[in-house]
């Protein structure tokens, strides 16, 4: 059994040999990535690449109802004998232990773990596979975050309070993205994923240009990660609106495929090997406000964070462009669209800014970021958002209130 001691990628990728002038640059990624319509039907064939005959499938009760029968049938027809474990809903230490104990009792020949679901199920699957020392196969059912491709899980307490990241020595062995499944998920999830993905371009750029900044794995970003991150953001800006329209029409189009790839693969490699900065720091900080933590998706918070980051960096034109994009695409572009008031809720928003500074991610910026400056940037982003909402004809963030 592996993975008992906490593993920190920075101790490996960020370690500098004596007598070295430049810091090492490094990139990690999933071993294989496959995306397409109805490809979940080929799951049996794909896991043969891992020489897996006895896979376990981690899936929620709802997921089991929707996809369980098909997955079971396809795995069995290709000669595998899957064991199903039900995911309880939280990526916590006790839930991971419960699943590992259950699978150990069921069949000790289990040689791969297939996690099917949203971010928390996939993250729990990575933990279980690491604990059992077997490869993990990731099948996302939504495209709302860049979690599928990374070698890190966000841990929570059993009550849903964030308890920090856990890193793994192995990246997912296989990521299988069925775009038919993704298009059947709520559009709000896809749009939130676009907010998360769009940030990758600007956060990696900040990390790349600042010699003192490091990526999530603790190394300097490669030019590959920089190019991937740029392509990620540009794909969202070029194809995002079209993909949203196609998703509404339930059409798995070329634009939709490209945006799903940006949300999942490009953004995943971008944040992990390119790095994060103020947009994510602010998004994380904002979750200290309970109404935001409970009602809004990660990528929705990140979206406004990008505008604040660009304003701090003095990139006014880009900030305006992104603000208009948020408003036009249906991402919250103002504090109002998060049901907050910039004046009345200023104390809470200042607390969020202070929390963001605590996260150390603002350390990627080439200047010192203070709570006051970050709050001011958020206020400016909000004011810019008011104009953007007006300029796109008053289109408001509409997912929460119908
Ligand atoms: Zn993110």
Image (tube, grey):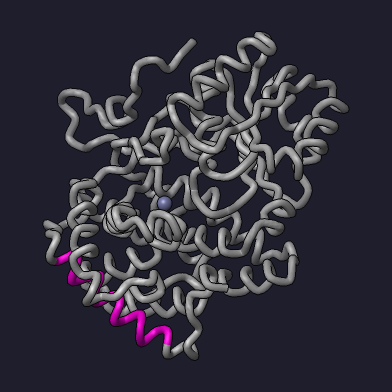
Q: Is residue 59 left or right of residue 203?
A: right
Q: Which residue: 73% across, 62% down?
A: 252
The location of residue 349, given as percent across then percent down, is 23, 64
Q: Is residue 202 left or right of residue 22?
A: right
Compared to residue 293, the image places residue 307 above or below, namely: below
- Residue extending farthest to the right is 77
> Is any atom of residue 208 visible in this view?
no
Q: Which quadrant holds residue 10? A: top left
Q: How many labels sit on residues?
A: 0
Q: Which residue: 37% across, 60% down?
A: 291
Q: Which quadrant holds residue 7? A: top left
Q: Main secondary structure of the magenta part?
A: helix
The location of residue 235, given as percent across then percent down, is 53, 65
> Is any atom of residue 167 visible in this view?
yes
Q: Which residue: 48% across, 80% down?
A: 396
The C terminus, quarter of image: bottom right
Membership of 379 in magenta stretch: yes
Q: Is residue 4 left or right of residue 147?
A: left
Compared to residue 54, the image places residue 31 above or below, namely: below
Q: Which quadrant holds residue 308? A: bottom left
Membership of 203 in magenta stretch: no
Compared to residue 246, the image places residue 189 above or below, namely: above
The location of residue 330, given as percent across then percent down, is 51, 73
Magenta stretch in the rendered image: 373-389
Seen from the viewer's position, the closer of residues 399 and 313 is 399
Q: Which residue: 27% across, 78% down?
A: 316
The location of residue 249, given as percent across then percent down, is 73, 71
Seen from the viewer's position, the closer of residues 136 and 68 is 68
């Amino acid at each position: 059994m592996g993975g008992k001691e906490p593993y920190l990628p920075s101790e490996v990728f960020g370690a500098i040999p004596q007598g070295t002038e430049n810091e090492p640059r490094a990139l990690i990624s999933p071993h294989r990535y496959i995306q397409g319509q109805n490809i979940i039907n080929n799951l049996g064939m794909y896991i043969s690449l891992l020489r897996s005959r006895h896979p376990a499938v981690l899936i929620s009760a709802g997921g089991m109802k929707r996809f369980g029968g098909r997955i079971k049938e396809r795995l069995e027809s290709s000669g595998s004998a899957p064991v199903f474990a039900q995911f309880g809903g939280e990526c916590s230490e006790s839930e991971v232990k419960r699943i590992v104990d259950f699978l150990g009792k069921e069949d000790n020949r289990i040689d791969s773990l297939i996690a099917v679901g949203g971010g928390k199920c996939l993250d729990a699957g990575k933990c279980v596979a690491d604990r059992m020392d077997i490869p993990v196969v990731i099948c996302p059912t939504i495209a709302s975050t860049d979690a599928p491709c990374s070698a890190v899980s966000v841990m929570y307490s059993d009550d849903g309070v964030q308890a920090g990241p856990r890193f793994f020595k192995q990246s997912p062995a296989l990521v299988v993205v069925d775009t038919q499944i993704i298009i059947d998920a709520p559009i709000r999830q896809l749009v939130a994923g676009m907010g998360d993905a769009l940030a990758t371009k600007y956060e990696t750029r900040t990390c790349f240009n600042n010699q003192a900044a490091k990526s999530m794995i603790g190394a300097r970003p490669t030019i590959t990660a920089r190019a991937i991150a740029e392509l990620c953001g540009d794909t969202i800006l070029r194809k995002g609106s079209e993909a949203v329209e196609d998703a509404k029409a339930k059409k798995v189009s070329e634009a939709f495929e490209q945006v799903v790839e940006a949300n999942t693969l490009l953004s995943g490699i971008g944040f992990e090997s390119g790095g994060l900065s103020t947009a994510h720091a602010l998004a994380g900080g904002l979750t200290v406000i309970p109404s935001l933590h409970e009602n809004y998706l990660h990528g929705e918070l990140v979206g406004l964070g990008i505008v604040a980051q660009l304003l701090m960096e003095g990139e006014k034109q880009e900030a305006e462009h992104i603000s208009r994009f948020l408003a036009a695409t249906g991402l919250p572009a103002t504090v109002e669209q998060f049901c907050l008031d910039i004046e009345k809720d200023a104390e809470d928003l200042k607390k969020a800014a202070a929390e963001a500074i605590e996260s150390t991610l603002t350390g990627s910026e080439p200047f010192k970021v203070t709570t006051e400056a970050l709050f001011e940037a958020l206020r400016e982003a909000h004011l810019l958002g008011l104009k953007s909402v007006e300029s796109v004809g008053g289109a408001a963030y509409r997912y929460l209130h119908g």
